[in-house]
Amino acid sequence: MFWGRFSSSNVKLTFSLQGANASALEKEIGPEQFPVNEHYFGLVNFGNTCYCNSVLQALYFCRPFREKVLAYKVQPRKKESLLTCLSDLFNSIATQKKKVGVIPPKKFISRLRKENELFDNYMQQDAHEFLNYLLNTIADLLQEEKKQEKQNGKLQNGSIDSEEGEKTDLTWVHEIFQGTLTNETRCLNCEAVSSKDEDFLDLSVDVEQNTSITHCLRGFSNTETLCSEYKYYCEQCRSKQEAQKRMRVKKLPMILALHLKRFKYMDQLHRYTKLSYRVVFPLELRLFNTSGDATNPDRMYDLVAVVVHCGSGPNRGHYITIVKSHGFWLLFDDDIVEVAKESRNLNN
């Protein structure tokens, strides 16, 4: 799920299938309501690539990400990479003469399979793993390009600072998706608090039966007591002590990507199984598990995309995506694009 900082009307939705092809979709939206310079294109499934198609659709309708990828397209041509293939795909959609249709992401899928053998087969893949791989790969590529540009500039100027060359620059991937968690540990003997920060591009939260996203996020930051053999070594006490620790959000990202951990390993079954629990999620979200020194802790997020797994387990099923675009909702199911009608509730 992607939550972005965008304004939206406070409507709630359920989804109904509307139309079966591109012409029906265009008719359903209507010429007067169809957004200017917007395109709604399905993606061809090459056997098992629904996991990829669903994530790509969610990212395409994440406006800050789309704009950066399209801007990358107009830069001087570089050797082929996953990012150049992605920018070609996004540009192909954005520059179509037709408003609706279907595009085969053949070049992107081919490059993906070349770069990572995990995706070079016809088995069902995990959309969350793919999202992580894609964002980190793009970030690594952008950092390497910046490093090369700096080195080339230093060489032209006749000097190279090795320490400066090893610094890791933040990229636009980090600017969009990166937040910071702080792991706080409080010694129960001397009350000293230590903290350790770590960055994230998405948050993975456990799910429980009949719950909500807000409850899942509160559970993510539940206080845990360290005792018995798990006692905490306190630097102030210089000995192991009982302590309490919890994880809180210190820096909120521009776009919050949330992953519900629905696949759980069951010891008695010796395999992963899907937790098909009902989890209610709002159209607007505020994080209540922020740290005391968090910047703008009352920031409100609006739901912009949901990637949904349909099926009974991690090795079977199908992925679809529901996105918000210009005030209305669309369902992307590989090469099929349908309008989502407004109703009373949006839940899963």
Image: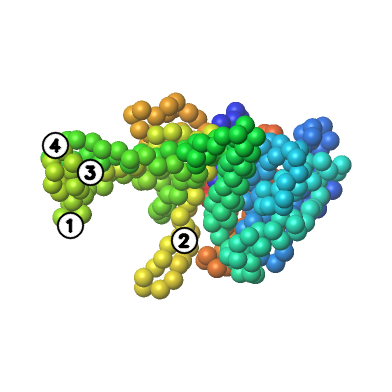
Q: Nearer the viewer, mark 3 or mark 2?
A: 3
Point out the frontmost of discs 1 and 3: 1
Q: In the shown orientation, is residue 149 left or right of residue 255?
A: right
Q: Earlier in the sequence, mark 2 or mark 1?
A: 1
Q: Residues within 10 Å of mark 1 (few under 14, many from 20)?
A: few
User: Residue 93 versus residue 302: which sits nearer the camera?
Assistant: 93
Amino acid identity at mark 3: Gln
The answer to whether 255 appears left or right of 271 in the picture is: right
Residue type highlighted by circle 2? Phe
Q: Which mark lies nearer to you, 2 or 1?
A: 1
Q: What amino acid is labelled 1 in the image?
A: Glu
Q: Which mark is residue 263?
A: 2
Label 1 belongs to which residue? Answer: 229
Estimate the spatial distance between the alpha carbons at disc 4 and disc 3, rounded to whole Å: 12 Å
Q: Residues within 10 Å of mark 3 (few under 14, many from 20)?
A: some
Q: Earlier in the sequence, mark 2 or mark 4?
A: 4
What's the distance in space between the residues labelled 2 and 1, CA to CA? 29 Å
The spot of residue 41 in percent (x, y) is 76, 48
Check disc 2 and report its element: helix, strand or loop. strand
Which is nearer the N-term, disc 4 or disc 1?
4
Alpha carbon separation for disc pair 1 and 3: 14 Å
List the residue tagged with mark 3: 244
Residue holding disc 4: 190
Q: Is residue 45 above or below residue 96?
A: below
